[in-house]
């Protein structure tokens, strides 16, 4: 089982003095950088999709085998 990690909240972190100045808030550079980092997050799910396809194929195969066995064993 994976080890669980606790995330620290942003309230416990000290805020930089530049973010509270009127110049930084007027220019809006802080909000732009936050939006840019949110759009930069693009995870790659190809191994997970491959595993899900494999699981689906195996499950379908098992169901087909069970159906065939039910017809064979009922005779």
Image (tube, rainbow, N blue to C red):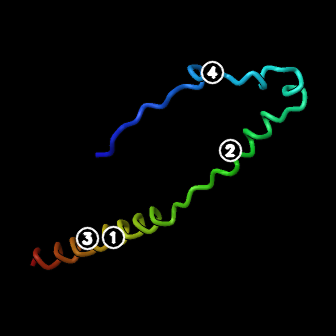
Q: Depth-wise, is mark 2 or mark 1 nearer the camera?
A: 2
Q: Depth-wise, is mark 4 or mark 1 nearer the camera?
A: 4
Q: Which residue is mark 2?
A: 38
Question: Residue 62: x, y in percent?
Answer: 25, 70
Q: What is the spatial separation of the Cα atoms under label 2 and label 1, in whole angstroms? A: 38 Å
Q: Which residue is mark 1?
A: 60
Q: What is the spatial separation of the Cα atoms under label 1 and label 3, in whole angstroms? A: 5 Å
Kindly check if marks 1 and 3 are in contact, taking CB atoms under 8 A apart as contact: yes
Q: Nearer the viewer, residue 41 or 53?
A: 41
Kindly check if marks 2 and 1 are in contact, taking CB atoms under 8 A apart as contact: no
Q: What is the spatial separation of the Cα atoms under label 2 and label 4, in whole angstroms? A: 21 Å
Q: Which residue is mark 4?
A: 14
Q: What is the spatial separation of the Cα atoms under label 2 and label 3, in whole angstroms? A: 42 Å
Q: Nearer the viewer, residue 1 or 58?
A: 1
User: Image height check: is 43 above or below 34?
Assistant: below
Residue drawn at (40%, 66%), measured in percent from left and top? 51
Residue drawn at (80%, 39%), measured in percent from left and top? 32
Q: Depth-wise, is mark 4 or mark 3 nearer the camera?
A: 4
Question: Residue 44: x, y in percent?
Answer: 55, 61
């Amino acid at each position: 089982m994976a080890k669980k990690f606790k995330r620290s909240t942003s309230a416990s972190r000290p805020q930089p003095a530049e973010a509270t100045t009127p110049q930084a808030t007027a220019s809006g550079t802080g909000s732009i950088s936050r939006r840019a980092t949110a759009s930069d997050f693009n995870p790659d799910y190809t191994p997970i999709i491959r595993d899900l396809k494999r699981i689906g194929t195996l499950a379908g195969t098992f169901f087909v085998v069970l159906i065939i066995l039910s017809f064979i064993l009922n005779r």
